[in-house]
Amino acid sequence: MHRLLRHRLSRVVPVVSVAALLVLSASSTSNAASTSTFATATLAGTWSGTYSGAYSGTFKLRWKQTRSRLSGSITLSNPPGTYGITGSVHGASIAFGAVGAGATYTGSVSGKSMSGRYKTGNGGGGRWSARRTS
């Protein structure tokens, strides 16, 4: 009985070991790739920018960030006011909305600058860009 069990184990153990190595190798490779490919930009702080199109003016963003979630406020020069904002950042892509102002923003982040397009609730829109100030 022991001889049969040892014979079967001698066939199974090398196959299981090779399979385990392949799984571990593949998961560490995919984790490394996903970490570098999908690294989320850090946006917490203050950003100043301009926008043009349906509305033109300046704005100041104050971001708080928890992983890929964004929250904070935006102060617009036109229409004037300060509004709450929420959004997300995935890799270099950013999307957020100004609660109360009825505007949505999409774009990309690169280092200390970001830019993109905005849309208003009444169908207008245009371009925006910002730079980190703190």
Image (spheres, rainbow, N blue to C red):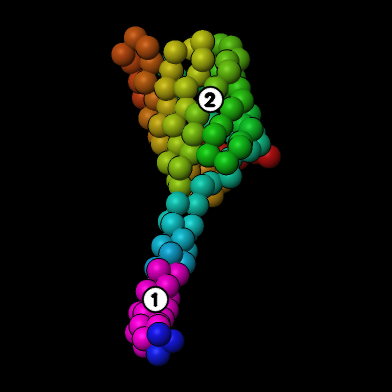
Residue 86's disc is: 2
Point out which mark residue 16 bears.
Answer: 1
Q: Is residue 84 visible?
A: yes
Which of discs 1 and 2 lies nearer the camera? The answer is: 1
Residue 70 pos. (x, y %): 56, 32
Quadrant in which the C terminus appears: top right
| Crowd tier of the residue under label 2, counting other residues whose Cα lies within 10 Å: few below 14, some 14–19, many 20 or above | some
- Residue 78 visible somewhere in the drawing: no
Q: Which amino acid, by three-letter code, is at mark 2?
A: Thr
Mark 1 burial class by Cα count in 10 Å: few <14, some 14-19, many 20+: few
- Residue 49 drawn above or below residue 10: above
Residue 23 image position (x, y, % from top left): 40, 68
**In front of the other: 117 or 88:** 88
**SS class, disc 1:** helix
Residue at image location 55% in from the left, 22% down from the top: 85
Q: Residue at x 36, y 80 (%)?
A: 12
